[in-house]
Amino acid sequence: MHPTAPGDTPDTVGGAALGTAPTPLSVLDLVTVGAGTTATEALRTSVRIARLAESRGFHRHWVAEHHSMPGVASSSPAVILAHLAAHTRRIRLGSGGVMLPNHAPLAIAEQFGTLQALAPGRIDLGLGRAPGTDGGTAAALRRGAQADPGADDFPQQLAELTRFLDDDFPDGHPYARIHAVPGPVQGPAARPSLWLLGSSGYSARLAGVLGLPFAFAHHFSARNTVPALELYRQSFRPSAALSAPYALIGVSALAAEDERSARRQVLASSLSMLRLRSGRPSLIPSPEEAEAHPFTAAEREFSQSWMADVVHGTPDAVRDGLDRLQKRTGADELILTAPAHGGEERLRSYELIADAYELPREAASEAIHS
């Protein structure tokens, strides 16, 4: 990637910590589809969550690229983000993330240039190097069948994407006369905010070296969180995008009126994760199905371990758990994903967490597009 000079532009990555929250709070929306519901309902819920998040002062709303997972309806982040942009006005929208090796860099630059034109100054482009699926599906995405295709040349793909976003390939480069549109060739315009995502040290180090903000997947790689964030901070070099490290962590968090209700939802999500990890992905099971499931000893151990990394319970318990996690990791921002079977439970969780942190309330007429 071409070098940048620190201080060229002001930092615009972070937001404000509102109410009593220790950091800005954000939403990671996996557009989950529960058993007995549909993708249409899940996508409608995403709009409701985005509107709620905007009205309560959450800083950003991200969706993540997944493929061939019946319980997740977010295979096309750019399409979903365009829809969310039409129903919100201020909240930042972005990908958490787009899996770069699945796509041509030019195609991503065009998609997110379009989003930036639709919602100027509100778009985050978070990039990951994993496929977001299994090897067979990765092959169907035209990536080949090797175990980790695209990982070795991830920095080169990232550099190419950045050149397209900035429209600054050098003279003589094969792509020098190719322009990503919408983009800078049409006139001065801010590009999407670029992030790197990861669940290990690879992307942490790369984000630090490039001076980019970093998002770590604590929600499924909790044991690696602190080492990865330390590596990111140690590796960080100031850039035009960012003068100091900025680390966001994804957290599974579910609040309910009582601990039992929260635990039932999280148990259902743990069964869904168990099926995914064993090669049998499904719709998110209902709490009743999860409670009736005949867990083996090994399955029970997996479920309990997974649930231990989910901050769940009453609103006060979730607030206290998030506070402890932020203090332990030093995260600059918490982005929360709500592991629940139903959309209403997810919506209610974000509302309860906002209340627990005394986040401001905005009049509904101001929060929702007319």
Image: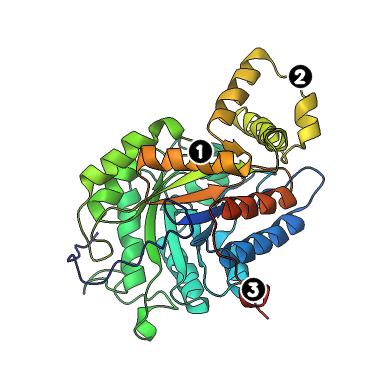
Marks 1 & 2, CB-CB < 8 Å contact: no
Decide if residue 280 is in sight here: no
In the rendered image, the quadrant that contains the N terminus is bottom left
Say what amino acid the circle numbered 2 marks. Pro
**Residue 84 x %, y %:** 61, 68
Query: Residue 35 occupies which quadrant of the picture?
Result: top right
Task: Please give the label number shown on residue 294.
Answer: 2
Distance, label 1 to label 2, CA atoms, is: 30 Å
Residue 54 lies, with reference to residue 301, above or below; the image says below
- Circle 1 residue: 321
Query: Residue 272 occupies which quadrant of the picture?
Result: top right
Residue drawn at 27 percent across, 73 percent down: 168
Residue 293 lies, with reference to residue 14, above or below; the image says above
Q: Secondary structure at mark 1?
A: helix
Residue that lies at the very extreme toward the bottom in this rendered image: 187
Q: Earlier in the sequence, mark 1 or mark 2?
A: 2
Decide if residue 168 is in sight here: yes
Q: Secondary structure at mark 2?
A: loop
Say what amino acid the circle numbered 3 marks. Ala
Marks 3 & 1, CB-CB < 8 Å contact: no
Say what amino acid the circle numbered 1 marks. Gly
- Residue 61 vs residue 9: left or right? right
Q: Nearer the viewer, residue 133 or 220?
A: 220
- Residue 340 vs residue 28: left or right? right
- Circle 3 residue: 363
Residue 315 lies, with reference to residue 267, above or below; the image says below
Distance, label 3 to label 2, CA atoms, is: 47 Å
**Residue 298 x %, y %:** 62, 16
Q: Secondary structure at mark 3?
A: loop
Q: Earlier in the sequence, mark 3 or mark 1?
A: 1
Residue drawn at 56 percent across, 75 percent down: 89
